[in-house]
Image (cartoon, helix red, strand yellow):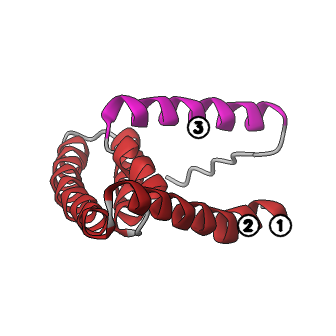
Amino acid sequence: MPLHYLIVLFIGIPILEFALLLEVHGIVGFWPTIILIFGTGFAGAALVRRQGIHTLSKIRHEMNIGNLPAPQMMDGIMILLAGAFLVTPGLLTDAAGFALLIPPVRNKIRFWLRKKLEQNMRNGYIQVNVNRDN
């Protein structure tokens, strides 16, 4: 990952989050802003737990019938990422976290990742070698 992306991620986003929280504080006040931060954290944690348990159940079911649960595993990773976003104080990370908890959003991300993977394989950036030992 190029350095400028890391700078944006680790410096730019927290600054933007802080500025947004200050703006919200100016509009609604201190305590409502604090309640909003904690409320989204608790609500997000509950939703992540619920969806995570449901996704684990789907993974187990797929494995029990002999299928590779790749879509469900990708959902699990996105739900885990949503949890990390939701426990991070800030409104932008909360929005990203809640978006990842919406199944159609996860489907679009999965579709985009699959297309990107296929494109990289066609261009030779990714090679897959299969070695079958019987």
Q: Is residue 81 visible?
A: no
Q: CA distance from mark 3 to mark 1?
A: 22 Å
Task: Kindly indicate the quadrant of the structure image that contains residue 36.
Answer: bottom left
Q: Is residue 116 magenta?
A: yes
In this picture, which residue range is highlighted in magenta? Answer: 102-123
Q: Quadrant of the N terminus?
A: bottom right
SS class of the residue under badge 2? helix
Q: Name the residue: 34% across, 61% down.
A: 83
Q: Are marks 2 and 1 in contact (CB under 8 Å)?
A: yes
As drawn, is 40 to the left or to the right of 88? left
Task: Kindly indicate the quadrant of the structure image that contains residue 33.
Answer: bottom left
For the stretch drawn in magenta, the main secondary structure is helix
Q: CA distance from mark 2 to mark 1?
A: 5 Å
Q: Is residue 85 magenta?
A: no
Q: Which residue is mark 1?
A: 3
Q: In the rendered view, would you say 25 is above or below 62?
A: below
Q: In the rendered view, would you say 112 is above or below 33?
A: above
Q: Callout 1, which amino acid?
A: Leu
Q: Name the residue: 20% across, 64% down.
A: 42
Q: Name the residue: 43% across, 60% down.
A: 26
Instruction: Provide residue 54's location: percent of width, then percent of height.
Output: 16, 48
Instruction: Provide residue 57's location: percent of width, then percent of height.
Output: 16, 49
How would you rate the neighbour count of disc 2 (Cα within 10 Å): few for under 14, some for 14-19, many for 20 or more? few
As drawn, is 130 to the left or to the right of 105? right
Q: Which residue is mark 3?
A: 113
Instruction: Provide residue 40's location: percent of width, then percent of height.
Output: 27, 58
Q: CA distance from mark 3 to mark 2?
A: 20 Å
